[in-house]
Image (cartoon, helix red, strand yellow):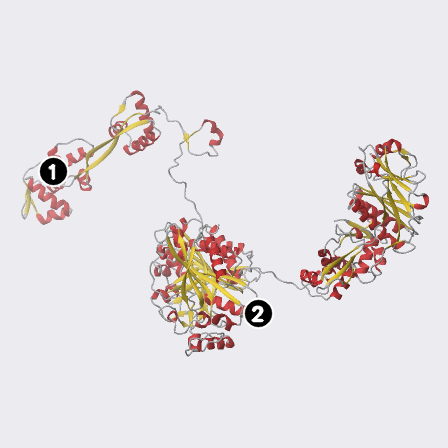
Amino acid sequence: MPTVSVGRDRLFAALGESYTQEVFEDLCFRFGIELDDVTTEKAILRKEKHIEEEADDDDDEEVIYKIEIPANRYDLLCLEGLAQALRIFNKKQEIPKYRLADISKEKMIKMNVRSDQTSQIRPYVVCAILRGVTFDEARYNSFIDLQDKLHQNICRRRSLVAIGTHDLDTLQGPFTYEALSPMDINFVPLKQTKSFRADELIEFYKSDLKLKKYLHIIESSPVFPVLYDSKRTVLSLPPIINGAHSAISLKTKNVFIECTATDLTKAKIVLNTMVTAFSEYCERKFEIEPVKVTYDNGDSDIFPKLAGYDMEVPLSYITASIGVSLELEEVTSLLNRMQLHAERSKSSDSQCLVKVHVPPIRSDVLHPCDVMEDVAIAYGYNRIPTRKPASIKPLPLNELSDLLRSEIAMNVYTEVLTWILCSHKENFAMLNRKDDNSAVIIGNPRSADFEVVRTSLMPGILKTVSSNRDHPKPIKIYEIGDVALLDETKDVGASNRRHLAALHCGATSGFELIHGLVDRIMEVMAIPFVPTGNNTGYYINLSQEPEFLPGRQASLIFKGKHVGNFGIVHPQVLINFDITDPCSYVEIDIEALL
Amino acid sequence: MAEEAILGFLQNNEKITDSGQFSSECNLDHNEVVNVIKSLHGFRYIDVEDIKKERWVLTDEGKKYAAEGSPEVQLFLAVPEEGSISKDELQKKLAPSVFKIGCSQAGKNKWVEMGKQVSRKVQHVEDKVKGLLLQIQEGKEIDIDSITSLKARKLIAPQIWKGYSVKKGPNYAPERKKVATDLTRENLQNWKELEFKEYNFNAKGAPLEAGHLHALLKVRKQFKDIFVQMGFEEMPTNNFVESSFWNFDALFQPQQHPARDSHDTFFLKAPSTTRTLPEDYVERVKRVHESGGYGSRGYNYDWKREEANKNLLRTHTTAVSSRMLYALAQKPFEPKKYFSIDRVFRNEAVDRTHLAEFHQVEGLICDRGLTLGHLIGVLNDFFSRLGMTKLRFKPAYNPYTEPSMEIFGYHESLGKWVEIGNSGMFRPEMLLPMGLPEDVQVIAWGLSLERPTMILYGIDNIRDLFGHKVDLDLIKRNPICRIGI
């Protein structure tokens, strides 16, 4: 993306308003440009020369805004174009009507093209004249900078188009555009005092940092493009350098602009960009004097082409693409803010069409979609009501469960899947627990195996160990599944809770290993270990649960809430479940960790 | 030691005829010699032939006598040289077994006079038994009569003795070359000189310590992925307790339907009834059951609120679907594709293929303008991702779907058509009371997760797949589930 540097104070003067940086940034954002950097001339110089920041910074130095411009908006590449676009966007200016000076073909300044010669190297030239221009230093600099920006961007480093600007009063038309042997071209180039022959000039510029990168465009050609006035004064040797003779200065009043090119379309765009941006400084604002270009086969054409063109865009296309319903009047007023003159088309009765006049500066508008985009920009992207395309939301609890299942398997535990239903005594008495009236009780059990909905995963896990008594030790198993508890807040009076349980069974109970697993679960949940009483993470307190061995059991406290327990399984519980090896066990309510 | 002895001996001699003899000559433990022979044979330093010999070894009793003397001699020595000793007195001096055997043997040998009083008949006896036992212990041959008599007294027993005769093998060398079994940090210093022991690729590698996921849940993951790939959103099914209303009535399942019998459904003692239901919707459901509406004649029976209030363990995840569809109908309509895979409960007898709980897989699409063609199309898509490409559909009855179709798939390896699921379009009597627009249809299908998993892993008893009786080894051995990929 190209960037333009403009003086903040000049820009605000041109906009007719001073902004805070924040408000200006918002304006840029809405319009689709970006305030990239805020700096000063000295800071830029220092950066170029890699000098450290000086302590005694001048406070009254002019602030420079570096603004990023979309690559297809050549009209915004200078302060004049940028300021005008924003003024119109802010409804502070009407769309200017650019016009050609009313001048007869006879009186028109002429450019004669020796196309037999130029076709060998750089076939095209287009020209225009700005009359009665008032330059000051800033305008002059902007004028030069714009040429530079255009050269770097659309002109593809001068290979497609090269711009020459001249003080018309130092020259005498008609002009000729030729292509001659370098040996036959002699002139004093810009910023030099002595005359060079063109081939010598090429050699001379090989050591010029700025110009040497353009030499390759013509260097190997037998003929070089060159423009002369009627007195054989060299205007320029495009795309390398202008003549010193016709150089413009702050005092220049009448500017002759020529664009030589290998691409005629781009040459026209470049010429239009130059003349429209600076015609506001002309004596007759927005008026440009045309130049007649005649080829040696007799064909001729008049430049610049300021007519623009009209496009008809269905209103429905615009509103349907953006997703807002807008009346035609709203659309035309929005388009006006984007420098596109628009009105209701009379060409169709059945369909509501917007007739859009695309001005010469808006070479980026190719298709109705470009018009539609401008409507959307002027409407405000961030005001458009959102529509959500169909998409899928995951269930966080199930996704987290699956992630934890994998994590625990990675910690070398084997997953089991046990029944939700169990007997009343498995759920209570066999775990040394009293019936606390928390369980969902089945009214019509077919067998004692299915009397209650488990309130913890412990019976299923212990039964699994009991059924696998011959399995080599240690046994390390886990399960993540739902338990159900009576719950007054639910319509049906009960709700599920997602629990995680893991067990170690071996020659030793593996209490530290289960403790380590608790820490690991907290680690993968990114929950920090904190001192007792701190509510930002988890800590562990000695507990007194009947299913665990006293002194070797603990509560897990997360953000001050009790979310689980672990410990050595009580020897009586082991006997109850017919387990002959010591076990340690953890059970955590993972819903509480979500 | 033993290795040097064997290889050294063979350097100068043709053959070791008997490893046992060789061991005792070299004063080596025969077991150690045998281990060395096996190892040398493995590397083909030597060739071997098995030798089997029957020989006699002392029983525990025999060993005791070899050490302490035979019971008859012990008894004889306990009788005084002069005079006599009372039998009771004698018995006190000896261990009971020694006394008993001693009396009988010494009597038989006519060494003593047995009676109330015991006295010697001869003055000197020789402990021949002890002598024979010691000879056997030393591996000496003894005469056949003595063998027979010792054997009869269970003092000796036959033992098969195994040994080898040994000759030079094809790789014979007087000294074994060191072979490496692994590249270690130490032998990395002299790896060029190393010769590696041949690795046995017929044996499996070392067992791993690993964690494992449960087979059924591995299959669940693949099903879930398939649904998500098809753009389905998961329904929250973490509510086992449900009211009859959402489980049955909302689905236009009449209150007399056999599925609502206590033989099929777990009803609850606690919490026995549901507390709240959306009353206006309940009213519409009651009306459609009793007298119809929405173009339906209804079931024409007395709909009872108490029946609807009865809590149960959900018999299908469609209870959740009915809640989801009702919620959908309370907002401006948007099409939805939902799925769930979770536990459901049936009060059925448990056998090889039935459990009181299993996992139901359910998918549904709610949209305007859906047809039976859409249902068949989405089923073809879904089941082809499971590897079932040939489907056909059987008309069936389901209280809340019309049309209803049982899904049959051609099982290539079983070579037959098997029922793989159930499907249908939800009845208007179910959807319209919810408040869904009239042109909205819902197509749905369901199947169990266990059945395809059992087919996939070749399990024919459901209790081997799911529950506490599952063999942990089975969980550890199950391969990854590759359906859907």
Give percent across and percent down for residue B392.
Answer: 42, 57
Residue tagged 2:
B331
CA gap, disc 2 to disc 1? 104 Å
Residue at the disc numbered 1: B149
Q: Residue furthest bottom?
A: B302
| Residue B22 quadrant | top left
* Quadrant of the rendering where the N terminus of chain B is positioned: top left
Residue A356: x, y in percent?
77, 59
Q: Closer to the observer: label 2 or label 1?
A: 2
Q: Earlier in the sequence, mark 2 or mark 1?
A: 1
Q: Judge the density around disc 1: few (<14), some (14-19), many (≥20) Cα neighbours within 10 Å.
A: few
User: Few, some or many C-alpha atoms within 10 Å of disc 2 (few <14, some 14-19, many ≥20)?
Assistant: few
The residue at the point 13 percent across, 37 percent down is B129
Asked if A174 appears above or below A363 in the picture, the reply is: above
Tell me, yes or no, whether the two marked residues, 2 and 1, touch with CB atoms within 8 Å. no
Q: Amino acid at mark 1?
A: Ser
Vertical comparison of B462 with A163: above or below: below
Of the pair A428 and B472, the residue shown nearer to us = B472
Helix, strand or loop at mark 2: loop
Q: Is residue B47 above or below residue A573?
A: above
